[in-house]
Image: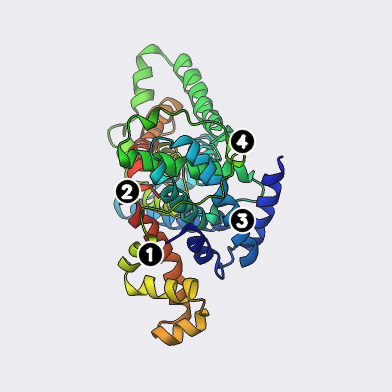
Amino acid sequence: MSAPEGHLKDLLVRGLSGDGAAYHAFLKALGAFLRGYLRGRLARVPDEVEDLVQETLLAVHNQRHTYDAAQPLTAWVHAIARYKMIDFLRRRAGREAMNDPLDDDDELLGASDEGAREARRDIATLLAKLPDRHRLPIVHVKIEGLSVAETARLTGMSESAVKVGIHRGLKALSALIRE
Amino acid sequence: METDKLIAMLAKDPEPVAPGVVARRYGAALAAGGAGAFALMLAFLGVRPDLAQAAGDPMFWVKLAVPLGLFAAALVGTTRLARPGVRAGWSAEALLVPVGGIWVLAGVALLSAAPGERMALVLGSTWTSCPFNIALLSVPAFAATFWAMKGLAPTRPVAAGAFSGLLAGALGAAVYCLHCPEMAPPFLGTWYLLGMAIPAAAGAAAGPRLLRW
């Protein structure tokens, strides 16, 4: 097993148990790998690579409960990235780009690219479209950094509704991207 | 929003993920689907009146083993396909064990029967309703297995849909055994399998649309 696999897996496993710093490091490193991977495969549409990096990171986050620590991280991440890329290409109806061969698991952790470009689609704009019960918990807890209890007091929602709102809101955000 | 800001947002106080989410979802889904199948069976079909007597016949248990074997293999396949990067693997081949088993028994029964009786062994007395009754009993489990899969992350939606449908069909067929009077392997090897194939085919067709994420 390669070095990035072991290191990233360790970060993700810690992240899944609630370690925010490890999870941040995991997403940061994964974002760079995704960028390298997608830039190689979406050479015809370089402007949309960052959008797909963001969409895939959001998908990884939303589906993180499907990761089984007994499973190679590379295979899991690669399957998500590939699924999102195919979905993206179908949406664009990019018939030419579909001809690119989609290859093995190993490559994703091979090409890292730290140089983020501007995303064309702004997730903040999509976030603003969410209903309050989704948007407010995300804005207060995940962006402004308030606690769940503080957010509950501020919004009049229950604490469990705040947690559910974050969870469902991030899924709804992913659905908005697919539209 | 820049990617770094998105990452900071996602990583801010991440909710810990409880292990065993796949098992919990399928436990709940199959309990609900099984209860639904049982309720439909009682409401529309009824338990066969000679059930106690039939349970003394080994063939009753062989008959029940066909959907239960498919249920077990489909459950393994479904829970595997719910995770990105995991294929159905050996569970797909394992489906052939109950199918092959009942076909061998059906072959033996047909060969040892007089030629004029073979058609009766295949058709029994309920062949016109059996597959549809099995499909009917699988409806609650079909909804439940799709609900379970929808909350996970299938990356092969046709296979994930087909396995989900087959899982529901096998559960429906197992419950149907409590009603159905047929005991001949040629009947089971034809109409039971067809009954379970209906939800499996429906699942394969519905997967790409219903399971997208």
- Say which amino acid is labelled 3: Phe
**Residue at mark 1 shares a chain with residue at mark 3:** yes
- Write the residue at 53% across / 65% down: B8
User: For the residues carrying marks 4 and 1, which lies nearer the camera in this image?
Assistant: 1
> Disc 3 designates what residue?
A26
- Say which amino acid is labelled 1: Ala
Residue A114 in sight in this render? yes
- Write the residue at 51% across / 79% down: A148
Residue sitting at the far left: B128
- Write the residue at 62% across / 59% down: A25
- Say which amino acid is labelled 4: Asp
> Disc 4 designates what residue?
A106
Percent across and percent down for residue A35 are 51, 45
**Residue at mark 2 shares a chain with residue at mark 3:** no
Percent across and percent down for residue B160 are 44, 41
Label 2, label 4: how many angstroms apart (C-alpha)? 54 Å
Which mark is first along the chain, 3 or 1?
Answer: 3
> Disc 1 designates what residue?
A124
User: For the residues carrying marks 1 and 3, which lies nearer the camera in this image?
Assistant: 1
> Disc 2 designates what residue?
B45
* Closer to the camera in the image, B182 or A9: A9
Dot 3, how many residues are within 10 Å of its Cα: few (below 14), some (14-19), or many (20+)? many
Q: Give the quarter of the image for residue B174.
A: top left
User: For the residues carrying marks 2 and 3, which lies nearer the camera in this image?
Assistant: 3
